[in-house]
Amino acid sequence: MQTLFKNIKGDRLIWAIVALLAILSFLPVYSAASDLAYSKYDGNTFISFVKHFMHLVLGFAIMYGVHKIPYRYFKGLSLVMLPVVGVLLLITMAQGTVMGGASASRWIKIPVVGLSFQTSTLAFVVLMVYVARYMSKVKDEVITFKASILPLWAPVFIVLALILPSNFSTAAIMFLMVMILVFLGGYPVRYMSIILGSGLVALILFIMVAKLTTGPLNVKVTTWENRIKNYSDSEDTDADYQIEKAKIAIASGGITGVGPGKSIQKHALPQSSSDFIFAIIIEEYGLIGGFSIMILYMWLLFRVVIVSQKSDTIFGKLLVLGVGLPIVFQALINMAVAVELFPVTGQTLPLVSSGGTSIWMTCLAIGIILSVSAKREEMKEKEINEDNPLEILSEAI
């Protein structure tokens, strides 16, 4: 164990925050998954616990392995992985697996092991790394809109176009995060306005075409419209079932909560262990539990910014922000949905909600952040050793 801790590099506080979020996730997931256990595992709730534990174990293994890779290698890996991601998204569109009642395919089955994998989450991380690479590459050049269309915006819009039909919320968040990253990277605002306008036009055209069809796209677009209408409408309808149950759970929790495992709304709230896990946390642990989770994510955001600022390269700075900001942003959206500050989106609570793909890709992103942080620590140690004449003498001997 001591050897393992010795080999762990990077920001120790990020390691601690991630570990704490993972530990705190066990009881809410175990409690919220009880109904799922009765419907799928003949009432054996321990299976859900073990499944979540294994997802986290694999996630931490991914995080540990990735953080040992020098972050400069991610430049080349993003170029290699972007076409791979495109192919995976095409396969998902063609033969994806419908899960959790979703009206469109978002998952593919991994051969041999039989696990389901949501390809859009991998695409998110790869695309952000790719954009960080491009912006760092042109940092000393005069950026023109024409020159950036093919190397930057063509891959972005292709990936978004492949994700949009099945997952509007993820595509929208990806687009927003890309816009924030290119802005931080110094991309001209006047060109960004053109891209934003083009994106809105493309979305409107997609919706118009989808409405003219009678297939799954029409159903998906209608679902989007209904969610927005239900959110803006002050009257409660049958379509508000999920959010109403979530609000009841939050109201029942009060300050200290009803106690671990004593949630009532977990039996009535769909996706209680994933999309609406935050409502269950507040019901069982009260506002104290809810604010504690929120503070951890804000602390993670603070550390991400610190690691970014301390990086010695533009690529390192943009890379950390590109993969780190979406984690916190997704967490805030999940919380906002639970308290009806945002329409229902289907975004999970990173590292807390059940679900293998979400946990693994979050750990992948955090591993990249830790890789940047580890490089900074390595350079600092090297500077200290070079400034120490006794160390130089010992190496000579």
Image (spheres, rainbow, N blue to C red):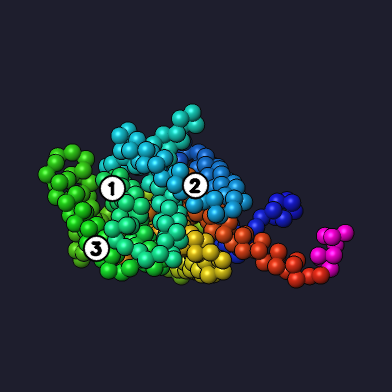
Q: Does 261 sit above or below residue 341?
A: above
Secondary element under disc 2, as helix, strand or loop, is: helix
- For disc 1, the marked residue is 161
What residue range appears in magenta? 390-397
Query: What residue type is disc 1 on?
Result: Ala
Q: Position of residue 338 (x, y in %)?
A: 36, 61
Q: On the rendered structure, is 365 left or right of 193? A: right
CA separation, marks 2 and 1? 22 Å
- The residue that appears at 33% across and 57% down in the rendered structure is 148
- For disc 3, the marked residue is 194
**Circle number at residue 2:** none
> Looking at the image, is mark 3 or mark 2 earlier in the sequence?
2
- Residue contact at pointers 1 and 3, CB within 8 angstroms: no
- State the image quarter where residue 137 is shown: bottom left
Q: Quadrant of the C terminus?
A: bottom right
CA separation, marks 3 and 2? 29 Å
- For disc 2, the marked residue is 77
